[in-house]
Image: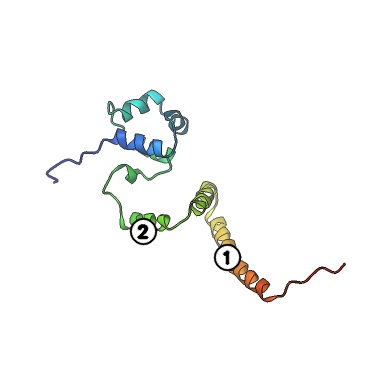
Amino acid sequence: MPKEKPQVNIGEVIKTYRSQRGLSQGDIERRTGLLRCYLSRVENGHTVPSLETLAKIAEAMEISLADFFPGTETPRDKETQKMLGELSQDEIRFLAEIKKYSTTLSEGDKRLVLAMIRKMATLLPAQAAQAKKQPLRRPSL
């Protein structure tokens, strides 16, 4: 059993994540159904939300429930953070857009989309290399 309880102010953590994402309490209210006054009480430390409520808030902010608790990163989380750090903002936006639509796809459709991306990724570099080898032709008049 730990000697000291971890000092985590969950309200401050929620407020920080919400602010970083440019979300208002009203945005969280619309996404979760939780009242804005309740969210204010949580953020100001007057109320401690249940784990179920925290999960709703995390989902509304598109983060993992574990993100609310420092020091709970798994090796997989660390690897994911490392990979995200290597991506450009455009790549992150592209992946976020894919994530938004992928939740409605079946597993078969997801495999199909990945196969199409792989195919496009292998064809495009080959086509670019081929285009470099061919001399430019002027259109005949």
Q: Examine the rendered structure and indicate whether residue 108 appears above or below residue 134.
A: above
Which residue: 57% across, 61% down?
117
Q: Residue at x 43, y 43 (%)?
A: 62
Q: Is residue 25 left or right of residue 128?
A: left
Q: Secondary structure at mark 2?
A: helix
Could you tell me how many numbered marks the image carries?
2
Mark 2 residue type: Glu
Q: Quadrant of residue 29?
A: top left
Q: CA distance from mark 1 to mark 2?
A: 24 Å
Which residue is identified by label 1?
Answer: 121
Image quadrant of residue 38?
top left
Tag on residue 79? Answer: 2
Numbered disc 1: secondary structure = helix
Mark 2: few/some/many CA within 10 Å (<14, 14-19, 20+)? few
Which residue type does callout 1 highlight? Answer: Ala
> From this viewpoint, is residue 106 visible?
yes
Where is residue 85, by image quadrant?
Answer: bottom left
Residue 16 drawn at (x, y percent): 35, 37
Q: Residue furthest right?
A: 141
Q: Earlier in the sequence, mark 1 or mark 2?
A: 2
Q: Quadrant of the C terminus?
A: bottom right
Residue 56 appears in view: no
**Residue depicted at x 35% and y 34%:** 15
Instruction: Residue at 57% x, 65% y: name it.
Output: 121
Q: Is residue 105 left or right of residue 66?
A: right
